[in-house]
Image: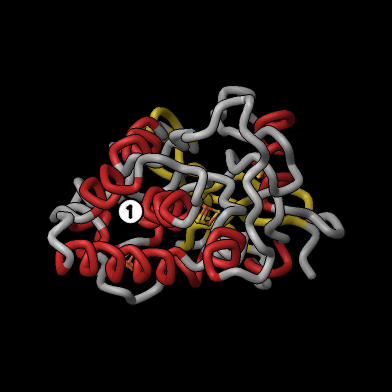
């Protein structure tokens, strides 16, 4: 194993270029460690984003050797056996600078998919009881651990072709709320995800599911929304 890594890092905005750095190789080194070394030791002007470093906050996602990944939980040994790394901002989002993307569009789409919880109970009501093995509980549990990292969004071809497409994360969140019996916005949410930019635009190739670092399946959630919207049409509710 070579003692150094050859690292090309994206600099500037959409019309930027890669800049080469040489970074010492360490045991158990993550891609985020590499970026941090560059910013702290080699070029303090490098812009990047992270917070928790333990796979919780979803802020450190970047394109690593051509694939979107969370960088704090990606070991260099997994992705750069030859000692070469190319690190770029996530695809399908405007670049603010260097490795930082503008996430507004990504989260605006969560709002467009009505992915906010709308409570139906008051503080005087008892807790809702949802059986652990019920279908609704399982549907929520399988999709709820999303950290909002946008890795799936960057991996989705349809987002690239159709910038209006709501994308896997917003639709995954809509599916969790659709299955939450405490929520009071099901009809509006189904209407919001049924349009041309919604669940039916998904081509089900599962790049999102393949790349999701939390091992969620937005593809399955979107399939659930397709069934739910089709049923709503048959019942004359949409
Ligand atoms: S579904 Fe997975 S890849 Fe997409 S934002 Fe959530 S955690 Fe990240
Ligand atoms: S399965 Fe659907 S949401 Fe996932 S990457 Fe493919 S088109 Fe995008
Ligand atoms: S820094 Fe929080 S998920 Fe990577």
Q: Is residue 202 visible?
A: yes
* Place of residue 151 in the rendered image (x, y in percent of width and height, measured from the top left): 48, 54
For the N terminus, the quadrant is bottom right
| In the rendered image, the vertical position of residue 201 relative to residue 31, given as above or below | below
For the C terminus, the quadrant is bottom left
Left/right placement of residue 152 relative to residue 156 reads right
* Place of residue 172 in the rendered image (x, y in percent of width and height, measured from the top left): 43, 56
Left/right placement of residue 154 relative to residue 217 reads left
Q: Secondary structure at mark 1?
A: loop
* Place of residue 214 in the rendered image (x, y in percent of width and height, measured from the top left): 62, 60
Which residue position is annotated with label 1? 167
Closer to the camera in the image, 202 or 85: 202
Name the quarter showing ligand 3.
top right
- Seen at 29% across and 71% down, the residue is 227
Left/right placement of residue 231 relative to residue 104 reads left
Left/right placement of residue 37 relative to residue 18 reads right
* Place of residue 157 in the rendered image (x, y in percent of width and height, measured from the top left): 28, 63
């Amino acid at each position: 194993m070579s003692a150094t890594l050859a690292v090309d890092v994206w600099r500037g905005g959409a019309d930027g270029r890669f800049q080469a750095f040489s970074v010492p190789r360490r045991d158990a080194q993550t891609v985020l460690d590499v970026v941090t070394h560059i910013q702290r030791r080699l070029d303090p002007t490098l812009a990047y984003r992270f917070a928790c470093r333990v796979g919780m906050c979803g802020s450190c996602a970047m394109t690593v050797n051509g694939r979107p990944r969370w960088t704090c939980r990606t070991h260099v040994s997994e992705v750069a056996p030859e000692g070469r790394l190319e690190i770029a901002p996530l695809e399908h989002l405007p670049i603010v600078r260097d490795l930082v993307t503008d996430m507004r569009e990504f989260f605006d789409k969560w709002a467009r998919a009505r992915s906010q919880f709308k409570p139906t109970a008051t503080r005087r009501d008892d807790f809702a009881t949802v059986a652990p093995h019920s279908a609704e509980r399982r549907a929520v549990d399988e999709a709820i651990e999303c950290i909002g990292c946008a890795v799936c969004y960057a991996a989705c071809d349809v987002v690239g072709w159709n910038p209006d497409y709501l994308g896997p994360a917003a639709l995954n969140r809509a599916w969790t709320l659709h299955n939450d019996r405490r929520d009071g916005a099901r009809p509006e949410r189904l209407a919001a995800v049924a349009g041309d930019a919604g669940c039916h635009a998904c081509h089900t190739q599962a790049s999102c599911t393949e790349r999701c670092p939390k091992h969620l399946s937005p593809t399955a959630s979107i399939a659930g929304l397709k069934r739910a919207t089709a049923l709503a049409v048959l019942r004359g509710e949409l």
